[in-house]
Image (spheres, rainbow, N blue to C red):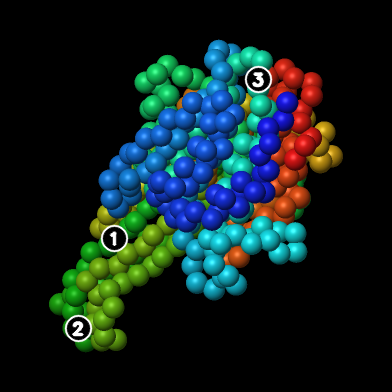
Amino acid sequence: MPNLIDPVELAEALIAVPSVTPATGAVFDVLEQALKPLGFTVHRFLRGDAPDGPVENLVAMRGEGAPHFGFAGHLDVVPSGEGWSGDPFVPRIEDGRMIGRGANDMKSAIAAFVAAIPQEQAQGTLSLLITGDEEGPGAHGTVAIIDWLQERGIAPDCILIGEPTSETVLGDTVKIGRRGSVNMWIEVPGVQGHVAYPHKASNPIPALARIVSTLEDWHLDDGNDAFPPSNLEFTEIAVPAGAANVIPGAAHARLNIRFNNLQRGADLVAHVTEVAEREGGTVRALISGEAFLTPPGLLFDLVVFAIREEVGVEPVLSTGGGTSDGRFLIKLCPVVDFGLPNATMHKLDESAPLEDIRALSRIYSRVIAKAFGSKNPSSRT
């Protein structure tokens, strides 16, 4: 039996609550109020302190035993920025699209999943794992949910993440893995001085330039059947502001490496550190996550079948794009990301077509039905 939640109306209610990362409070109230009438037991807990917290996390569960199917997502959003055509937290519908911060990434997907949940299930466990810290550092979000589950001996069999993965049309891309990501900050110290007296100073810029040149020439790998080649990009080069006749006292660079499963974050940091130290530099690094790949299996089949049956699209199985909380959840079980077309995520006037929200809910309904053995997925939405 279908539930009576309209995915568009629930998406509007979620978007209407500002929840810039790290998110807590009212936006989780809205979700809890939608889940409790469906028979879910809702657990909410805060983790972390300022500036990266507090972060609210929600685990909602219904049923018991196997199979255990999980859905993961986040209610936090990135800051809206200036230049919207209206209030980013007052959702509005124009030309068949829902406009508002989080409409694409990813409050609409959460609403679509909740609307897809049947009123009852005959067997197994259905859970939602929702964080308020996906768009932030991630230190107190999904990692805390994983700790909460493991402390209680709870282990989903598979997890679907509702990130916006589709590229052109709904259903054209499913993420079966993600590249790893590491940020690094390089500092080369110098001795400040007058440009007319270089022997009394030490210019750090040439040393930093050599580091940059060496790393730009570094061939990491050629990729493999599942992943593209690993890629290093410099994102900042800077020296302290000064006069035109002053040799700076330090020079800085920042880089990011998106890497495949041929690499490990620690090894990449070690190599960059070795290059920098040859020139007297130091490196600080933050590994956001390692590359992961979900092997073919039941979860693939559930999602691909549902997409094919509902919208007639044969999805590409991809590992491209940015990271997701799948980098943490893969420790528990197989993980797949699938959601709306992502053209407007993080942009001004972020939006999602209403029909895509409804169709996504129907796809999720088919996934749930297949996961629990039903042959009659709801087509109400």
- Pointer 2: residues within 10 angstroms few (<14), some, or many (20+)? some
| Relative image position of residue 300 (x, y in whole percent) | 69, 28
Name which residue lies at 81% across and 41% down: 311
Q: Kindly report the distance in space between the C-alpha atoms of the residues bearing marks 2 and 3.
A: 76 Å
Q: Callout 2, which amino acid?
A: His
- The circle on residue 105 is none
Q: Callout 1, which amino acid?
A: Glu
Q: Nearer the viewer, residue 26 or 169?
A: 26
Q: Kindly report the distance in space between the C-alpha atoms of the residues bearing marks 1 and 3.
A: 57 Å
* Mark earlier in primary sequence (1, 2): 1
Name which residue lies at 43% across and 24% down: 149
* Mark earlier in primary sequence (1, 3): 3
| Relative image position of residue 231 (x, y in whole percent) | 53, 51
The quarter of the image holding the N terminus is top right
| Relative image position of residue 137 (x, y in whole percent) | 39, 48
One can see residue 135 in this view? no
1 or 3: mark nearer the eye: 3
- Pointer 1: residues within 10 angstroms few (<14), some, or many (20+)? many
Q: Callout 3, which amino acid?
A: Gln
Residue receiving disc 1: 187
Q: Nearer the viewer, residue 218 or 358?
A: 358
- Determine whether, in the image, residue 204 is placed left or right of residue 211: left
Residue receiving disc 2: 194
Q: Nearer the viewer, residue 93 or 204?
A: 93
* Mark earlier in primary sequence (2, 3): 3
- Pointer 3: residues within 10 angstroms few (<14), some, or many (20+)? some
Look at the numbered discs 1 and 2 and tell me whether their residues touch, using CB distance below 8 Å: no
| Relative image position of residue 22 (x, y in whole percent) | 40, 50
Name which residue lies at 51% across and 44% down: 30
Residue receiving disc 3: 121
Look at the numbered discs 1 and 3 and tell me whether their residues touch, using CB distance below 8 Å: no
